[in-house]
Image (tube, rainbow, N blue to C red):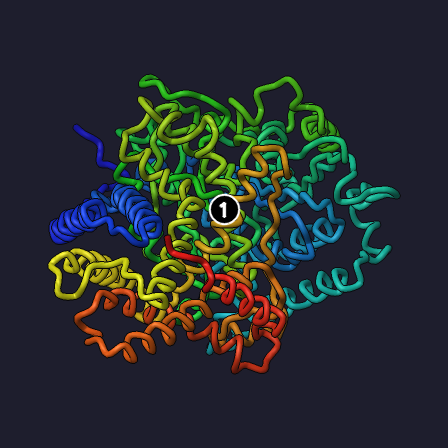
Amino acid sequence: MEMERLFATEKVGGRTLYKLQAVTVFLGICLVLCYRVTHIPAAGTAAWLGMLAAELWFGFYWILTQSVRWRPIRRRTFKDRLAARYGERLPCVDIFVCTADPRLEPPSLVVATVLSLMAYNYPPEKLNVYLSDDGCSILNFYALWEASSFAKHWLPFCRRNNIEPRSPAAYFAQSDKPNDPQALEEWSFVKDLYEEMTERIDSAFRSDNVPEEIKANHKGFSEWGTGVTSKDHQPIVQVVIDGKDRDAGDNEGNVLPTLVYMAREKRPQYHHNFKAGAVNTLIRVSSVISNSPIILIVDCDMYSNNSDAIRDEMCFFLDEEMGHKIAFVQNPQNYNNMTKNNIYGNSSNVFNQVELRGFDGLGGPLYIGTGCFHRREILCGRRFTNDYKEDWDRGIKEKGNMSIDQVEEKAKSLATCIYEHNTQWGNEIGVTYGSAAEDIITGLIIHCRGWISVFNNPPRAVFTGVGPTTLAHTIQQHKKWCEGVFSIFLSKYCPFIFGNGNISLQLQMAYSIYSLWAPNSLPTLYYLIIPSIGLLKCIPLFPEITSLWIMPYIYVSVVANIYSAYEALLHGDTLKGWWNGQRMWMIRRITSYLNGGIDTVRNMLGLSKMGCPVSPKVSGEGELKRYEQEIMEFGSSSPEYVIIATIALLNLVCLVGGLCRILTSGENMPLNGFFLHVVLCGLLVVINIPIYEAMFLRKDRGRIPFSVTLISIGFVMLALFVPLL
């Protein structure tokens, strides 16, 4: 008798209408290019050929984006079947939480995430939570020590009341007081404990000091002696809760998950490979403490929002028919602090609901760095074979003859700077080095080794975190991502080269959508500048409105944007949110992707060093208030803001000047060759209205500084003297 599957795979509906739209848009793109090639003018030839090059690129890139929209699928798990088949005989799981800087990622935020991960609806003796602190901060260790005490109350409270989410910060911020007096008493007691713990952690953070009387409570505090800094220190591994110690239970006598603090050794003369180096060290350290077959990697700001998530993932790994082929299960990255209209375009709805599902239909989603469950063996370099069989019973259940101190010392020896020298770590083993997008490149390599991955997006979000709340943070985050993915495309791991013969062409195309963010900046800049200047100087670069050749331009633009808006609305965005997303699409291309591409090339030429800045998780009070009011935040004289302001001003000047010239020339405007110029330039002016407000109308601290406005005016004046040859 055939065993029932633990998960189902379903095709996403509505593809026939989509494919019809895509085919007609493709034909429209071909007609646009045909017009460009067959109507090269005698005057303005260079500008015309530049438009041809830009449109060729946009057409090519549009084709790439169709790879993840052609046959998306969705997955559905059956946890009841898992329970009936396995009960509590489930694999052990090691959970890695990564943090790097307590100033940007406050310790109270970090421990709220850790507590949510400790509180999974899963056998606690099979959970092992590791915090990697790349800032080697005694404040993070202190926060973890405080969390270990609070967990004795928090975990039983979660179990008894079956609460969601299990991050105490998120739960108490969202939940109302219970009506039942007995439940209210318990709720208030636990809430008071949490607030007192948070206040102690925040107080230590503000004073940058842990009280001496507290340091006597755990031997781990002695690791922070004289001379320890964030960039120069010995390896530190401390088991804060030993889940194998039956005396270390919660206040109801139940076992607690193992909780471990790790700060790998750092020395100025050794490169530490950023997050990739931290994860690889965690893989080794955990191998001598718990050695679970499944590893979950989570960023410190992405708390668990679904207590049944691990059981969900096990439906994929333990499925008898397909489980042995699955290397990792990727969950979407959701944010709980998005404004209603998505002011900075950081909503991931379309990416999660459309693009990742499209990846899943091609062999599996890419690894996006957080919220991902990996098989340990595969993450460590194992290639796919049909006879592969996982040892689900692996995992260190007893310490054997070693004391906890001996285990820690052994783990420390695996966290030194020199351990990886002359080894395959970061190359064939573990997360791959050499890119700021270590997650993407690692996932690509795993796919090329023959494995598939799965995208899991249950009705209740698995993880929820904090998204950027300022324009500067958004630009910085996308610049970091752009540098990472573009460096992959320019390396031996280029999807079209490394993936050739190993993965399908469609999956190669899908990976390249993100790898080619940087080159998108140049044709976008060209299209934002040259047609506007052409309008001002009365040099036509589009067909006349009376010509049939105008139809493919209108059709492609209108249909593509209507479908984009439909896609956004269908998956939870507002119409204004979609419009804000279009503005941010433009801003990211001319700032994040432009600078990211330049820095990547500089890095490859040895003119600069690769960096991996941490995105701040906190904002000032004024910034946060403007974010909640959906007012764009500028406030500094950033070079990126000069680019944004210059493009906005240029289009305003060209629209006004061009219309004045056309209207005063006596020509009938609708019949001349500048209709599309006016439409394009006019749309750019409308979409940049928040930029003009920030330059000329606003008085708050988030406005564009006057110095930026002056510099932008200067660049606009220079641009107007550029001849369109």
Q: Residue placed at 63% from the left, 56% from the top? A: 105
Task: Point out residue 263 in the picture as x, y percentages from the top left corner.
Answer: 70, 40
Q: Residues within 10 Å of mark 1 (few under 14, many from 20)?
A: many
Q: Residue placed at 31% from the left, 41% from the top? A: 359
Q: Left or right of 204: which side holds 167? A: left
Q: Left or right of 272: which side holds 690? A: left
Of residue 597 and residue 719, the one placed in the foreground of this image is: 719
Q: Residue placed at 12% from the left, 53% from the top? A: 17
Task: Point out residue 525 in the picture as x, y percentages from the top left corner.
Answer: 42, 55
Check disc 1 and report its element: helix, strand or loop: helix
Task: Point out residue 601 in the picture as x, y percentages from the top left corner.
Answer: 54, 38
Where does label 1 land, which residue? 481
Q: Residue placed at 50% from the left, 46% from the top? A: 481
Looking at the image, is 471 positioned above or below residue 300?
A: below
Looking at the image, is 15 positioned above or below residue 641?
A: above
Looking at the picture, which amino acid does disc 1 mark?
Answer: Trp
Of residue 390 and residue 711, the one placed in the foreground of this image is: 711
Instruction: Check the image and name the residue furthest to the right.
Output: 226
- Within the image, what quadrant is residue 87 found in? top left
Task: Point out residue 725 in the picture as x, y percentages from the top left corner.
Answer: 37, 52
Looking at the image, is 606 positioned above or below residue 712?
A: above
